[in-house]
């Protein structure tokens, strides 16, 4: 796993926790693709505008969000990140506390692709490490 790619993934979670969407967009390739695999809305988001829509949708769905990075796994050209996401329902205040996994593809110092999965197993399988 390249140090640069790991540093980028860590910086993205730090920016997310600060609510710094500008920093997140700066680390996205202009042709970035975000694929939600049924975790939030199951949608496909394309380009930097898509990243902004994805973040806005997530912000509308949950208040006071934070993502704690628990584990990074190298998959060759991608990084699987296991995170603990916390927040609360905007209307109900019901707490959210769950683990999710992201598969990051970093090319040339920018995020080319992000896939969001419910489980580590699903993310590892998608990254070609499990069948």
Image (cartoon, helix red, strand yellow):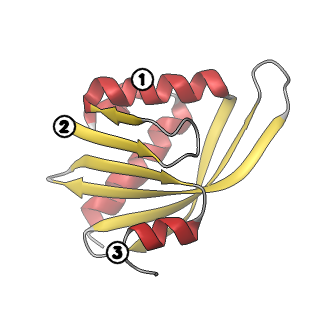
Residue ID at (30%, 73%): 1
Give the alpha-carbon distance from disc 1 to disc 2, as whole Å. Answer: 14 Å
Residue 17 pos. (x, y %): 55, 37
Residue ID at (85%, 32%): 94
Q: Is residue 35 above or below residue 130?
A: above
Q: Furthest residue to the top?
A: 91
**Image-based side of 114 in relation to 119, left or right:** left
Residue 115 pos. (x, y %): 41, 52
The answer to whether residue 68 is visible is yes
Asked if disc 1 and disc 3 are in contact, CB closer than 8 Å, the reply is no
Q: Furthest residue to the left?
A: 108
Which of the two labelled residues, at mark 3 and mark 2, occupies the earlier sequence position?
2
Q: Which type of secondary structure does the marked residue at label 2 adopt?
A: strand
Q: Which type of secondary structure does the marked residue at label 3 adopt?
A: loop
User: How many C-alpha atoms fall within 10 Å of the one at disc 2: few (<14), some, or many (≥20)?
Assistant: few
Residue identified by numbered label 1: 53
Residue ID at (41%, 67%): 126
The answer to whether residue 29 is visible is no
**Image-based side of 65 in relation to 69, left or right:** right
Give the alpha-carbon distance from disc 3 to disc 2, as whole Å. Answer: 22 Å
Which of the two labelled residues, at mark 1 and mark 3, occupies the earlier sequence position?
1
Disc marking residue 31: 2
Nearer to us in this view, 126 or 97: 126
Residue ID at (53%, 32%): 18
Asked if disc 1 and disc 2 are in contact, CB closer than 8 Å, the reply is no
Q: Is residue 8 above or below residue 124?
A: above
Residue 23 pos. (x, y %): 35, 32
Instruction: Indicate the quadrant where residue 89 lies.
Output: top right
Disc marking residue 75: 3
**Image-based side of 116 in relation to 48, left or right:** right
């Amino acid at each position: 796993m390249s140090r640069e790619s790991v540093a980028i993934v860590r910086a993205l979670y730090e920016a997310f926790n600060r609510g710094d969407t500008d920093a997140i967009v700066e680390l996205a390739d202009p042709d970035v693709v975000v694929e939600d695999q049924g975790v939030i809305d199951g949608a496909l988001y394309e380009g930097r505008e898509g990243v902004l829509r994805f973040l806005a949708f997530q912000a509308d769905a949950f208040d006071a969000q934070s993502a704690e990075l628990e584990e990074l796994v190298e998959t060759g050209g991608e990084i699987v990140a296991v995170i603990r996401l916390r927040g609360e329902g905007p209307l109900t205040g019901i707490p959210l506390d769950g683990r999710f996994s992201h598969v990051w593809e970093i090319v040339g110092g920018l995020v080319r692709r992000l896939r969001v999965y419910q489980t580590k197993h699903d993310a590892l399988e998608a990254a070609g490490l499990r069948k």
